[in-house]
Amino acid sequence: MTQEAVPRFRPRPWIELLTPQDVEAWIEEHNACMQEMISPKETGVGICFTLGPGGNVYMQTLDDAVVLDVDEEAEWIAPLIVAATGAEPPKGRIWVLPADRLVQLILGLSTLVASTVLVTGHKFGVRARAYY
């Protein structure tokens, strides 16, 4: 394998998070990792959750919102996102949730996640923010 073929970020196996405190510790750990490994100039920064039953959910956190890009294989997760966050399903695949729903969202997804990986350059649907 050439140096160019080595991925910049590697998937990390998921460890189920059982309490809000577990989620908050996970968030702190990932924030520190992102600050260390990703330049402030990079865009489309977030985390990809690979779901055990299939599909990926890409998440980007902002000061006032959580943006999710749910790929086609993961569309089945929509009812869980609604139940965990109280959000209405979007017309497309981009969800924009209030920032205060992050802990509930991750707790809701926790039993279904197989792995996570940091991402950069992902198109999180900038136009979706206009509807938030």
Image (cartoon, helix red, strand yellow):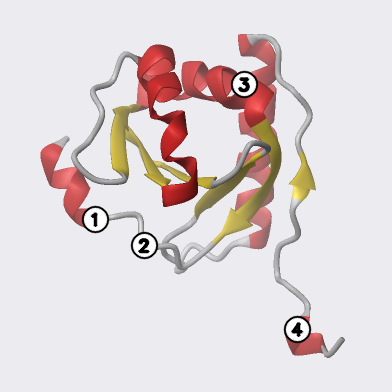
Circles 2 and 1: CB distance less than 8 Å? yes
Kind of residue at badge 3: Glu
Front of the two marks 4 and 3:
4
Q: Nearer the viewer, residue 24 or 97?
A: 97
Q: Judge whether 53 appears above or below 98 on screen.
A: below
Circles 4 and 3: CB distance less than 8 Å? no
Q: Is residue 90 visible?
A: yes
Front of the two marks 3 and 2:
2
Q: Answer few, some or many: residues within 10 Å of disc 4's Cα (few below 14, many 20 plus, some between 14 and 19).
A: few
Q: CA distance from mark 3 to mark 2?
A: 26 Å
Front of the two marks 1 and 4:
4
Q: Judge whether 69 appears above or below 3 on screen.
A: above
Residue that mark 4 sits on: 5
Kind of residue at badge 1: Val
Is tag 3's residue or tag 2's residue first in the polypeptide sequence? Answer: 3
Identity of the residue drawn at 56% across and 59% down: 119
Q: Answer few, some or many: residues within 10 Å of disc 3's Cα (few below 14, many 20 plus, some between 14 and 19).
A: some
Q: Answer few, some or many: residues within 10 Å of disc 1's Cα (few below 14, many 20 plus, some between 14 and 19).
A: few
Residue that mark 1 sits on: 126
Residue that mark 3 sits on: 24
Expressed as whole percent of the image width and height from the top left, the position of residue 66 reads: 37, 35
Relative to 115, 102 lies left or right: left
Is tag 4's residue or tag 3's residue first in the polypeptide sequence? Answer: 4
Identity of the residue drawn at 68% across and 29% down: 26
Front of the two marks 1 and 3:
1
Expressed as whole percent of the image width and height from the top left, the position of residue 132 reads: 17, 35
Residue that mark 2 sits on: 123
Q: Is residue 64 visible?
A: no
Kind of residue at badge 2: Lys
Q: Secondary structure at mark 1?
A: helix
Q: CA distance from mark 1 to mark 3?
A: 26 Å
